Amino acid sequence: MFAVIKTGGRQYRVVPDDVLEIGKIAGDVGTIVQLGEVLVVGGDAPVLGVPTVAGASVAAEVLDHKRGPKVIAFKKRRRKNSRRKRGYRDEITVIRVTEVLTDGKAPSIGPRPKKEKAPAKAEADAGEE
């Protein structure tokens, strides 16, 4: 099953376990967020929204908040000794789609547990001496 969602002025076709970089959304790393603007829910019998599908949402886990690449806007007026250099970086949220929900259901899959680092034996041996 797939869905077409709209967030940040863009549309994305998503299936469960997709990892996306979208515009910044509220939510701490490791939490589950619901994206409610679902335009299409596909599968055996696709459902088109007018403009959105009622009761449909997409559950996603927030993996990271980061900044995109720097974009430089440089303007120059020739022979006028006029130059303007301005740059910016977009705020990005990385999410993993966990499931596509219909009929107003709540997410059933919680956030994935984080992998803990195994203590290094070299550090353990150094502490005993």
Image (cartoon, rainbow, N blue to C red):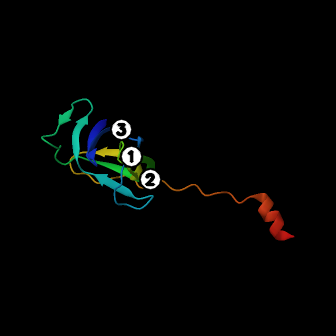
Q: Residues within 10 Å of mark 1 (few under 14, many from 20)?
A: few
| Residue found 25% across the figure and 51% down from its top | 105
Side of 127 relative to 70 (left or right):
right
Rate crowding at label 2 as few (under 14), some (14 to 19) or many (20 or more) other CA atoms within 10 Å: few
- Residue 97 lies, in percent from the top left, at 38, 45
Residue 32 picture location, percent across and down: 37, 56
Do labels 1 and 3 touch, CB within 8 Å? no
Q: Are marks 3 and 2 in contact (CB under 8 Å)?
A: no
Query: Looking at this rendering, what residue extends furthest in the right direction?
Result: 129
| Residue identified by numbered label 1 | 74
- Location of the C terminus (image quadrant): bottom right
Q: Quadrant of residue 100?
A: top left
Percent position of residue 82, x then y: 36, 50
| Residue drawn at (14%, 42%) of the image | 51
Horizontal side, residue 109 vs residue 102: left or right: right
Residue occupying image coordinates x 38% and y 41%: 16
**Quarter occupied by residue 6:** top left
Give above or below for 13 relative to 87.
above
Mark in the foreground, 1 or 2? 1
Q: Which residue is mark 3?
A: 15
Q: Earlier in the sequence, mark 1 or mark 3?
A: 3
- 99 vs 52, nearest the viewer: 52
From the image, tell me which residue sits under label 2: 67
Mark 1 vs mark 3, foreground winner is 1
Q: CA distance from mark 1 to mark 3?
A: 39 Å
Callout 2 amino acid = Arg
N-terminal of the pair, mark 3 or mark 2, is 3
Labels 1 and 2: the sequence-earlier one: 2
